[in-house]
Amino acid sequence: MKRTGAWPALAAAAPLALALSACIPSVGGHQDYPPPPRSDAGQRPAPEAYERPGLQGPVQALPAPRPAWEARPVAPDAASVTASSYEAVPGDTLRGIAERTSAGVDAIARVNRLAPPYVIRVGQRLTIPGGRYHLVKPGQSGIAIARAYGVEWSRIVAANDLAEPYVLRAGQRILIPGSDTAPPSLAERASAFNLDIDDILTGGEPAPAPNQAPVKAVATAKRVLPPTAVVEAPARISSGGFAWPVDGRIVKRFGPGKSGERNDGIQIAVPVSTPIHATADGVVAYVGDGIAALGGLVIVKHGSGWTSVYGHASKLLVQRGQKVKRGQTIALSGDTGFADQPEVHFELRKGRTPVDPTTELPGT
């Protein structure tokens, strides 16, 4: 079962899951909520607020393109490969064998225990693993691929043994779990559309085209980067450590709760429209409300593997790909998502692992 950061009660989440499952198509282009109104340019009008099912209050956002997984949908056109063996001939390379068999380079290397630089000997017999292989195209993201096939992105990560930073490459063939003869169940399709923080961190970035260099982070929210732009993330976290995002009272702490639900961060009670500050210098990786439980959401990458998460915002003041400074206001607090009261959900993660923020913040 997925975690969404601050877990709502299961009873509160169940009606939403049932409502979502009723409107999910078999596979292909899909949105699991009614989209907000957009201008002809495909941008969200401002300062108009929009509201989606499951949110207690509206979320206001700057005009911004849709995230990569919505802006660049994926067709489920995987090639079905039958398990076989292949005997290498003069001139063969692992990439050439992958092209010939439609299997993935990484999958062939893994099953045959080949290590870089993948030298192939003439006469060497290789096992070609069977399965469904999707050829990644420029701009496609892991989330969009997962949704196209009705498979959770976390299952694709595991099936392909993907490693940090999890950005796919155009031309890469990835294995899609499941069978092309047995379509995914309704529950599996619903789960593929139910995002959590880990999904966005590992599957939200678009695949760069060959030789496409990352773009530099922008200084202000006035310059909007396209959703398919690959943004250069900070390499190292700046000195000074982490600062509190708001000044308030902790009402829910990190870890398991009394009823067994897990909180991947802390909840800080503050009045509505309290400025939310970046905990450290970084680059905005996500802005939106794609995780219903967290409402208005900002995710910032800080370098050295650190990421911060800010949820339940009523107003979002930054753009994806924007450079922010420690203490800069990035959003205003609210009671959006499954908030129990006006509050801020705050997380720190090292890689994919949630870390108790109170162990990293000053004065705790």
Image: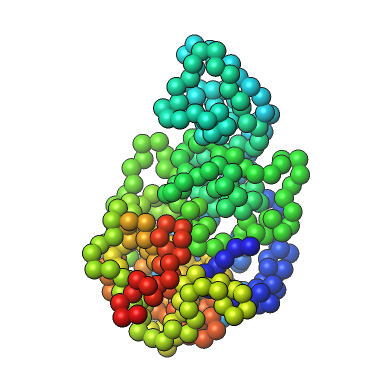
- In the picture as drawn, the residue positioned furthest to the left comes out as 239
Q: Position of residue 80 (x, y in %)?
A: 67, 33
Q: Is residue 161 left or right of residue 191?
A: left
Residues 320 and 10: in front is 10
Q: Is residue 57 left or right of residue 18?
A: left
Q: How many marks?
A: 0
User: Does residue 193 show up?
Assistant: yes
Q: Quadrant of residue 62?
A: bottom left
Q: Is residue 60 left or right of residue 26?
A: left
Please say if 63 is above or below 126. Answer: below
At 55% across and 48% down in the image, what residue appears? 157
Q: Position of residue 219 (x, y in %)?
A: 26, 62
- Point out the image quarter for the N terminus: bottom right
Residue at position x 55%, y 17% from top?
Answer: 124
Residue visible at 53% across and 80% down in the picture: 339
The image quadrant that residue 309 belongs to is: bottom left
> Which quarter of the rendered picture does the C terminus lie within?
bottom left
Outermost residue, right side:
182
x, y percent for residue 202:
48, 53
Rendered location of residue 212, percent (x, y) = 36, 40
Say whether residue 202 is left or right of residue 322: right
- Asked whether residue 328 appears in the rendered view, the answer is no
Q: Residue at x 58, y 16 (%)?
A: 87
